[in-house]
Amino acid sequence: MKKFLAACLVPACIAAIAIPVNLVITSNPAQAAPAQKFQSFQGNGFAIQMPGTPKMETATVSIGQDKSPMTTYATQVSAKMGYAVMVLEMPVSFDPKSKMAQDLLNNMEKDSGKMLKSKVVAKQSFTLSGNPGRELTLSDPDGFGKTRIFLVQNRLYMLIAGGESGQANKQNIDTFLRSFKLTKL
């Protein structure tokens, strides 16, 4: 799980929708608050509780013929533990109720364990304000993490939290995931 955040911030999402992009998001751990101290943060259509102030990274990715903006908000509480929210603006032609949208969620669920080089030990489907989502719990001998993926209109949200054994605190990870709320789009 050493490379949990570096491996999962974007590549699992990107691979699931076949976008050839590789981003590495880092932040200065000295600027992050302790994992137990969460604060409110608002981003592209969402509000969440995160430890420290996240660093924002932006990129433009190709989805078929379209170019789409992607923003990642990441905070690293130590060299071995971090949290991130990734927001991908899907093309205008994307229909979140289509078979393609469900295939996207299914592929992300199926491929995340492989991409993160971790075992998916639990998974569930659910909705957030009527929008489809998935949650995966990942584990390996080195650590623990969770990811949640939501499709909300033409946005894909991916929440990621995890780290090495001794650093990954299940209660803090669950606080982060449960605090995610949609705001106006």
Image (spheres, rainbow, N blue to C red):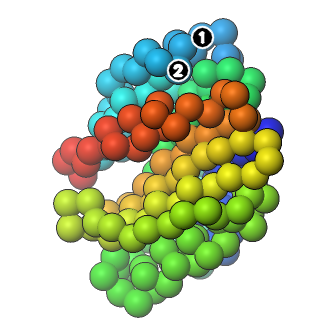
Q: Left or right of 95: which side holds 157?
A: right
Q: Left or right of 162: which side holds 68?
A: left
Q: How many marks?
A: 2
Write the residue at 74% across / 58% down. 118
Three-letter amino acid code at disc 1? Gln
Write the residue at 56% across / 31% down. 169
Q: Position of residue 157 (x, y in %)?
A: 43, 55
Residues at marks 1 and 2 touching, judged by CB atoms closer than 8 Å: no
- For label 1, count other residues whose C-alpha is less than 10 Å away and answer few (under 14), some (14-19) or many (20+): some
- For label 2, count other residues whose C-alpha is less than 10 Å away and answer few (under 14), some (14-19) or many (20+): many
Establish if 139 lies above or below 119: above
Q: Left or right of 178: which side holds 75?
A: right
Establish if 91 lies above or below 142: below
* SS class, disc 2: loop
Three-letter amino acid code at disc 2? Ala
Write the residue at 71% across / 62% down. 119
Write the residue at 68% across / 52% down. 139
* SS class, disc 1: helix
The residue closer to the viewer here, 33 or 46, is 33
Gap in angstroms between the C-alphas marked 1 and 2: 12 Å
Pointer 1 residue = 31
Q: Position of residue 11 (x, y in %)?
A: 69, 58
User: Would you say residue 63 is visible in this rendering?
Assistant: no
Establish if 19 lies above or below 168: below
Q: Position of residue 165 (x, y in %)?
A: 72, 34
Pointer 2 residue = 35
Which of label 1 and label 2 is nearer to you?
Answer: 2
Q: Position of residue 56 (x, y in %)?
A: 54, 32
User: Would you say residue 146 is visible in this rendering?
Assistant: yes
